[in-house]
Amino acid sequence: MKAILRISFAFLLSLVLAWGLCLFLSAPAFAQKTIPNVVGMTLLQAQAALAQAGANSITYSQRPISDRSLDQKVYAQTPAPGLPMAGMVVLEYYQFQGVMPIVVGLTLDQAKNALIKAGVPGDMININPLTTNIPILDKKVFGQTPRPGEPIFGTIVLEYYRSDR
């Protein structure tokens, strides 16, 4: 009786192993995702493509430029496209950084228009009024940060006179 049980157990075990081997051999090979080429994409497009490819960590490095058309465009990536996705990817991209024009002496509206023309979004311009009793100075810019010729990066501060008359 014990011999029959041992033979039955051995037979069942061999059937299970054979079945497992058949499943293993017939299963499609595990497809490892590769790093897509994101150079030339916008930062948002590159993030989406990398997330879909399984990147679990993206590190960023920005390079200031004065050409608005290249703003937020990826110009390099590490590791190179086509390699297996190993986790972390480094993206290098362009960040617009214009040059501050001279706005001292202009009216507040003229100064804002000059900054917008230079590529500064309107919500990055802070204005600080100083009250004066000289009507001719009303709404004239007398101070600016950053100074003329310096890179525009971050908030712009314009100081101007506001007449109390």
Image: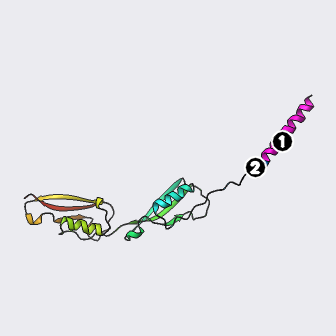
The quarter in which the C terminus is drawn is: bottom left
Q: Is residue 133 left or right of residue 29?
A: left
Residue name at image x 29 percent, y 58 percent: 123
Q: Main secondary structure of the magenta part?
A: helix
Mark 1, residue position: 15
Q: Which residues are magenta?
A: 1-21
Q: Is residue 94 above or below residue 31?
A: below
**Where's residue 49, x and y in %?**
53, 59
Q: Is residue 7 above or below residue 144?
A: above
Question: Amino acid under label 1?
Answer: Leu
Residue name at image x 8 percent, y 64 percent: 135
Whichever of labels 2 and 1 marks the residue nearer the N terminus, that label is: 1
Question: Amino acid under label 2?
Answer: Phe
Q: Is residue 19 left or right of residue 37?
A: right
Q: Picture quarter containing residue 110?
A: bottom left
The quarter in which the N terminus is drawn is: top right
Disc 1 secondary structure class: helix
Residue name at image x 33 percent, y 69 percent: 98
**Where's residue 83, x and y in %?**
61, 62
Q: Picture quarter containing residue 115?
A: bottom left
**Where's residue 138, x and y in %?**
12, 63
- Return the mark for residue 6: none
Disc 2 secondary structure class: helix
**Where's residue 36, x and y in %?**
57, 62
Looking at the image, the residue that sits furthest to the top is 1
Q: CA distance from mark 2 to mark 1?
A: 14 Å
Front residue of 58/22: it is 22
Mark 2, residue position: 24
